[in-house]
Image (tube, rainbow, N blue to C red):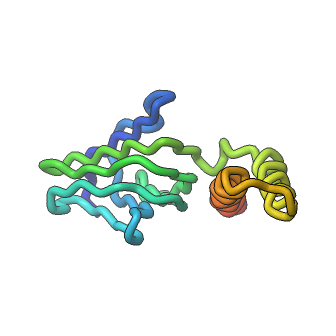
Amino acid sequence: MTDFSLRIVTPDGVCYDGMAQQLTVRSTTGDIGILAGHINCVAPLGMGRATVVIDGQKRYAACIGGMLSVVDGKVTLVPTTFEWADQIDAQRAERSYQKARDILSRKDATNTDIKLAEARLRRALVRKSVAASK
């Protein structure tokens, strides 16, 4: 496979800046796969597992929100949250999942509580799934 330039940067800093052979991320409308020579594009990111192939090796990450851009062969991923599988605290993700389920099971939960708990639950499920693929 041919390499392309990939830069992954979050509000917390640069997660990766180098060459890659493939990137697959979840957009708001479905998965997008990027290879060298991809057409220029910009896409909003959804919430899901990112797969990055570097030096022929697949690496997985939880990728939540943000934007993807491909301009003249340079790929820039600007997610709100990006965590490599080996950096995810699976126990913390499980606690977050349980807390969200507890809130969702309460009969006195407000609409705001429910919306926040649903978002927390989705993030926790992504992290748990990615952590399991280490």
Quadrant for residue 39, please give it. Answer: bottom left
Q: Is residue 122 above or below residue 99?
A: below
Q: Position of residue 31 (x, y in %)?
A: 40, 69
Left or right: residue 40 compared with residue 82: left
- In percent of the image, x 46 and y 31: which residue is there? 11
Quarter occupied by residue 14: top left
Q: Is residue 118 visible?
A: yes
Q: Residue at x 44, y 44 (%)?
A: 79
Give the percent coordinates (x, y) of residue 63.
Answer: 51, 52
Give the position of the N terminus as an image quadrant. Answer: bottom left
The answer to whether residue 22 is above or below residue 65 is below
Give x and y (percent) for residue 65: 46, 50
30 left or right, relative to 6: right
**Residue situated in front as seen by the camera: 79 or 85:** 79
Quarter containing the C terminus: bottom right
Number of marks = 0
Front one among 110 and 73:
110
- Picture quadrant where residue 35 is located: bottom left
Q: Residue at x 64, y 60 (%)?
A: 122
